[in-house]
């Protein structure tokens, strides 16, 4: 086997590293590397360098906008109709989506009238002396009071320990339905909790702001819950959580 | 056209990467790739079945050099492979050399690579980042296949020097 001189080897070790050498040459390089410390050192360094660049040098991917414009612009004039076809579908989808959005926003959902009524009722309850028909912080007083007046059984609990003492309850009338209205206090604020039956499926809790009042509502166990107050949204949601969890 | 998309779309990342490394800036790389795609589209008929990636990258490389030459030639250094290969300044001891080249610092690697003349930078990009075989590199950078290995050897030696320089500055 003919010996490789170092100068040649120091070039070939790159082909060796990149696995581009034919087997015979590769064997020569391997043999030389095993006996020549200097070339072995350079080979080692080249290997480390290759790995560093491969792993850590930035790779610049084509921006999505570039890809889009290249593929769109370089598909010139495949006939007017095809071009129309290409744009019609997205255009119609966009139009349909826009229409749906407008309808969604413009049409009061089944929720909205109820929420509006609930807010009005909340305001009314604070105006006169008609906050509660039954004034008690004892749920065993409030709950039985509803019996016979409602065709469903609203959950009644006192949350004094959590900062929401039960003030009492009254009957209200929302969405042409007799509704249980519980009132809770939180610091100086009054929270009205409206509970009315529904045949609709459960719905997750959602918060909104109506005429400056915070409203938290959800549906569970065929009852609709609407909480209205001027307390902070997060605090109202906290009471909502308590009511949801029961007890 | 279907064929154009099939041929070019898979290689847009590679094209942009090469153009970005050669031109050193985003907007130039965009322009280069746009222009290259246009050319590729125009010459689509001439492209017989073969290596679409190498073919497209060849166009991108040429466009990149056109841009480089036009932009004041600041980075433009023509270098042939017979450049002296003396390893004079490489008389560092083992440890700092390895420390310098065994880096995970992307910014440092980028700086070092950008300091290389384009003809060396491009072979590193094509080999390490695109993992092109020597025969494709030969096509793209338009040199005989026998020259690819020595070009890479030289490029790696230069890159090592740059990293050492940067390392010493730290």
Image (spheres, coloured by chain):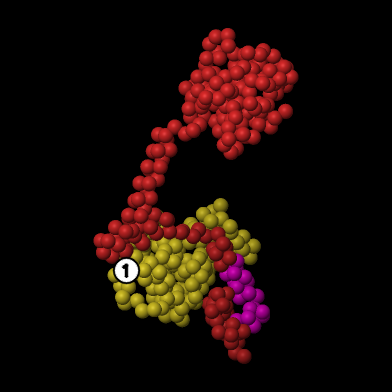
Q: Residue furthest bottom?
A: A1
Q: Position of residue A229 (x, y in %)?
A: 56, 21
Q: Residue at x 29, y 60 (%)?
A: A83
Name the element at disc 1: helix
Prevailing secondary structure class for the magenta stretch in the rendered image:
helix
- x%, y% of residue B59? 35, 69
Q: Is residue A131 above or below residue B89?
A: above
- Is residue B61 a member of the stretch shown in magenta? no
User: In x, y percent, where is residue B51?
Assistant: 42, 76
Residue nearest the viewer, comparing A150 with A129: A150
Hue used for the chain lettered A: red
Which residue in the structure is indicated by mark 1?
B41
Boundaries of the magenta span:
A29-48
Give the image quarter of residue A225.
Answer: top right
Q: Check the picture and name the quadrant holding the C terminus of chain A.
A: top right
| Residue in the picture at 52% in, 16% down | A123
For chain B, what colour was chosen? yellow
Subunit bearing disc 1: B
| Vertical order, A185 against B152 (above or below) | above
Is residue A111 shown to the viewer in this render? yes
Residue A108, relative to residue B106: is it above or below? above
Q: Is residue A74 left or right of residue A172?
A: left
């Amino acid at each position: 086997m003919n010996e490789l001189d170092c100068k040649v080897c120091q070039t070939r070790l790159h082909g060796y590293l990149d696995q581009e050498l034919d087997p015979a040459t590769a064997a020569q390089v391997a043999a030389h590397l095993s006996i020549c410390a200097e070339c072995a050192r350079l080979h080692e360094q080249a290997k480390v360098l290759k790995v560093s660049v491969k792993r850590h040098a930035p790779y610049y991917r084509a921006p999505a906008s570039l890809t889009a414009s290249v593929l769109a612009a370089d598909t010139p004039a495949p006939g007017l109709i095809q071009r129309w076809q290409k744009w019609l579908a997205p255009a119609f989808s966009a139009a349909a989506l826009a229409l749906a959005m407008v309808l969604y926003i413009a049409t009061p959902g089944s929720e909205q009238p109820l929420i509006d009524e609930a807010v009005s009722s909340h305001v009314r309850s604070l105006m006169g002396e008609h906050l509660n028909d039954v004034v008690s912080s004892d749920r065993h007083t409030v709950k039985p009071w509803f019996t016979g007046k409602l065709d469903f059984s609203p959950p009644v609990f006192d949350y004094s320990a959590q900062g929401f003492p039960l003030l009492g309850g009254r009957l209200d009338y929302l969405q042409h339905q007799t509704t249980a209205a519980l009132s809770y206090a939180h610091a100086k604020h009054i929270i009205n909790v409206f509970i009315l039956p529904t045949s609709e499926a459960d719905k997750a809790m959602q918060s909104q702001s109506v005429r400056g009042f915070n409203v938290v509502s959800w549906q569970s166990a065929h009852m609709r819950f609407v909480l209205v107050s001027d307390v902070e949204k997060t605090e109202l949601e906290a009471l909502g959580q308590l009511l949801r969890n029961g007890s | 056209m279907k064929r154009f998309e099939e041929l070019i779309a898979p290689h847009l990342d590679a094209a942009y990467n090469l153009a970005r490394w050669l031109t050193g800036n985003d907007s130039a790389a965009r322009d280069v790739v746009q222009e290259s795609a246009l050319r590729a589209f125009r010459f689509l008929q001439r492209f017989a079945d073969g290596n679409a990636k190498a073919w497209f990258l060849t166009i991108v490389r040429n466009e990149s050099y056109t841009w480089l030459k036009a932009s004041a030639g600041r980075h433009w250094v023509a270098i042939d492979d017979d450049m002296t290969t003396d390893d004079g300044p490489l008389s560092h001891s083992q440890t700092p050399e390895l420390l310098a080249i065994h880096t995970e610092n992307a910014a440092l690697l980028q700086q070092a690579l950008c300091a290389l003349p384009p003809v060396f930078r491009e072979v590193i990009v094509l080999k390490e980042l695109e993992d092109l075989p020597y025969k494709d590199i030969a096509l793209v950078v338009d040199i005989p296949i026998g020259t690819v290995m020595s070009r890479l050897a030289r490029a790696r030696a230069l890159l090592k020097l740059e990293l050492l320089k940067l390392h010493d500055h730290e």
